[in-house]
Amino acid sequence: MRRSFTTVELLGSGDTVSLARRLRARCSQLERCALRRAVLRSALASLEKGWCPGNAEHCDHPAHDAAWVAWDHLTRWDAIEEEREHEERGAYEERELLEFCLRESGRIPEAEIRRILDTTMNTAGWSDLVGGWIRDPLVERYDAARADYLAALRSLVLRDAAGAR
């Protein structure tokens, strides 16, 4: 992307350059959070597989319950941290509960639990890290920027090709 961007800056129109800058910003955002995002999304997928395969409302299997609680905590960790921030031991207790549930679920290896807990220490951009259950706003923003950029390039190429005839 960086090498291509230099060429676009040299040869592209103002609109194309601004779309390329927008796409480059989205790529940079994905790069910055890729590792943390992979850790969380992998954990969430593993925890979902640990949910009760039957009727969850009548399930009393501790591993299924723990998988659900851990999944729920991870998906809304930024809100939990914000709620507990002003309580003396609130956030620490929530982190202990998360750690307990991750272990009890039986779905996450010990080394991965450490990575997950390390990731929870910084909640900046949390919704971009966990994405959505149905929609993933971070990827949607990247896809939109990419589509706009490619459409501009196509029209530029077609216009130049038509002008050359």
Image: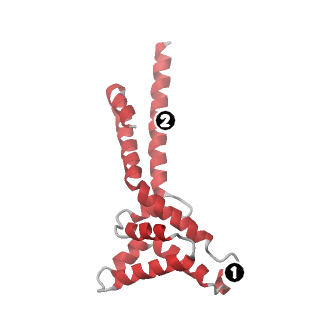
Q: Is 110 displayed left or right of 46 in the figure?
A: left
Q: Position of residue 150 (x, y in %)?
A: 48, 36
**Residue 12, above or below 142:** above
Q: Position of residue 79 (x, y in %)?
A: 39, 74
* Residue at screen point 51% across, 66% down: 43
Residue that numbered label 2 is attached to? 151
Q: Position of residue 162 (x, y in %)?
A: 50, 18
Q: Nearer the viewer, residue 156 or 90?
A: 90
Answer with the quarter of the image where residue 17 lies: top left
Answer with the quarter of the image where residue 59 lies: bottom right
**Residue 96, above or below 107:** below
Disc 1 marks a residue whose amino acid type is: Asn
**Residue 54, above or below 88:** above
Q: Which mark is residue 17?
A: none
Of the numbered discs 2 and 1, the one sitting upstream in the chain is 1
Q: How many marks?
A: 2
- Disc 2 and disc 1: Cα gap in Å? 48 Å
Question: Which element type, helix, strand or loop, lies under badge 2?
Answer: helix
Answer with the quarter of the image where residue 60 lies: bottom right
Question: Which element type, helix, strand or loop, lies under badge 1?
Answer: loop
**Residue 14 appears in the rendering:** yes
Q: Is 155 displayed left or right of 88 in the figure?
A: right
* Residue at screen point 62% across, 75% down: 51
Residue that numbered label 1 is attached to? 55
